[in-house]
Image: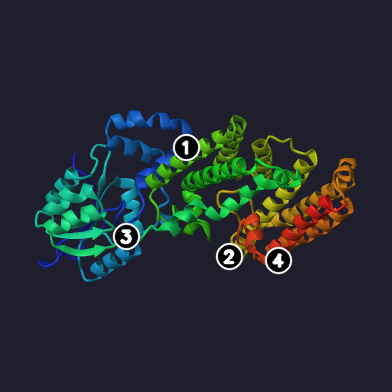
Amino acid sequence: MKPHVNFSNEDGPSCRTSDLPLVVDLDGTLTPTDTLFESVIMLIKRFPLMVLLLPFWLMRGRAVMKSRIAHYVQPRVSSLPLRQDVVDFLVAEKARGRTLVLATAAHHSIADAVAARLGIFDAVLATTDRVNLKGKLKLAALQQHYPQGFVYAGDCSADLPIWAAAQGVILVGVPASVGKRVRNKHAVEREFVASQRGLVTWLKALRVHQWAKNLLLLAPLLTGFVFLESGWMVPMILAIGSFCLAASATYLVNDLWDLDSDRAHPRKCKRPFAAASIGIAQGLGVAALLLLSAFVMAALVSASFAGMLALYLVLTSAYSWSLKRYVLIDVIMLSVLYTLRIVAGAVALDRAVSSWLLAFSVFVFLGLALVKRCSELVSMQKLNLHAAHGRDYRIADLVVLWPFGCATSVAAVVVFGLFISAPETVARYGSPELLWLSALGLVYWQARMWIKTSRGEMHDDPLVFTIRDQGSRITVLLIVASLLAAHLIA
């Protein structure tokens, strides 16, 4: 059976004798991502049990597997990232009359959609239900349809046999070893260098700035004044480190899980996976390594703490994969995850957690989660959007979320005020009345967060914003200083 061929302009201008047809690959060449990997992720996301069928489909051949996946899911081609320099080059070549051909191992439904989006290709050759158009099979199809010769643009070692038979070579982001082999044997017509995936890109993907949240594990150390004792430093360093690595692993997986919705978001579309700055396979490999390292560090603290880390991963995965799509349930889960970090810190120190601290934490973090949702809706309101993609929130919900969030923040202050008057506080603190200074600082800090949100200035996670915002930093330091003074001053 012949490979799928779709001539979009059969009566168009023919190729000049000096300009051979330019054949372009899709995955890794025209787009920096891999549409097969993205399709598999979409399949698992929408039909989780079908992951069990993938090995059986693959046993029948890659063409069958791609066909079966394409039957159930299709990547959103309209938001698929493209190599703009390659696209600009192709548009210029098309303008001067050159025949352009999209030849790819991707399923023909994906290839046709990409060709329709760009509107510059004269023909499309792609994988069908029986033929996986890759390597030698792609070469055979090209030689059959273009016996006069062609120029080929590819990106990896699978393209080596095609380059060997082509009359012209174009390299797009090839690995150094592959590029060297091609240049030694063929004249390269043009080369597009891949953008560097440096440390900054990986730090952004790992969300290192979000590690600040894991300082919450120190809360029992401060509220219980355990820092005045000895032996806490090593377990706390290991505990915080394990949560940081585990959190980064979940961010990587979550970003892969949310590729489609992230690309539709005004800010999240710039994330490394959404923009295809980092490959999907690389991301999964790094995530696995981070998780393994996190559990090794957690086990060094204690078996109980490793269990807390496992519970955190289960809950954060449930949030990322399902619960975050439900209005209000997502913010409640976020408050639980924040509070869980405090409980994990107590487990690492082998200390009990005060019921006052738990109640206070739930209200504070629920308020901060609502700050985050309101800030996202405010940003969308400025862009004239009416709803959050992938989340059950609408701009109209701000009417409810504003007062609910402010009330939750006030509830945290009320709990703190009751804590100040509690008998155990009076017995434990030398000057408990000084805690009212902390209460005032808490009022100012939370009100500042809500005002920044209303102004559209809350561009980060609220806890990260607190660390970056000078006014919030000073306020939190004053709150901590008041707590210490209330404990130490008799």
Query: Quarter of the image holding residue 81?
Result: bottom left
Q: Between marks 1 and 2, how big is the CA–CA gap?
A: 41 Å
Q: In the image, is 173 to the left or to the right of 19?
A: right
Disc with the residue nearer the chain's start (1 vs 4): 1
Disc with the residue nearer the chain's start (4 vs 3): 3
* Location of residue 444 in the rendering, given as x and y in whole percent from the top left corner: 78, 61
Q: Between marks 1 and 4, how big is the CA–CA gap?
A: 38 Å
Q: Which residue is mark 2?
A: 383
> Front-most of 77 and 48?
48
Residue 236: in sight, yes or no? yes
Q: Between marks 4 and 2, how big is the CA–CA gap?
A: 28 Å
Query: Quarter of the image holding residue 52?
Result: top left
The amino acid pointed to by label 1 is: Leu
The amino acid pointed to by label 2 is: Leu
* Location of residue 360 in the rendering, given as x and y in whole percent from the top left corner: 77, 46
Q: Which residue is mark 3?
A: 194
Disc with the residue nearer the chain's start (4 vs 2): 2
Q: Between marks 4 and 3, how big is the CA–CA gap?
A: 41 Å
* Location of residue 274 in the rendering, given as x and y in whole percent from the top left corner: 45, 54
Disc with the residue nearer the chain's start (3 vs 1): 3
**Badge number at residue 292:** 1
Q: Which residue is mark 4?
A: 471
**Badge number at residue 366:** none
Residue 327: in sight, yes or no? no
The amino acid pointed to by label 3 is: Ala
Q: In the image, is 298 to the left or to the right of 195?
A: right
Give the SS element for disc 2: loop
Q: In the image, is 435 to the left or to the right of 238?
A: right
* Location of residue 135 in the rendering, given as x and y in whole percent from the top left corner: 20, 45
The amino acid pointed to by label 4 is: Gly
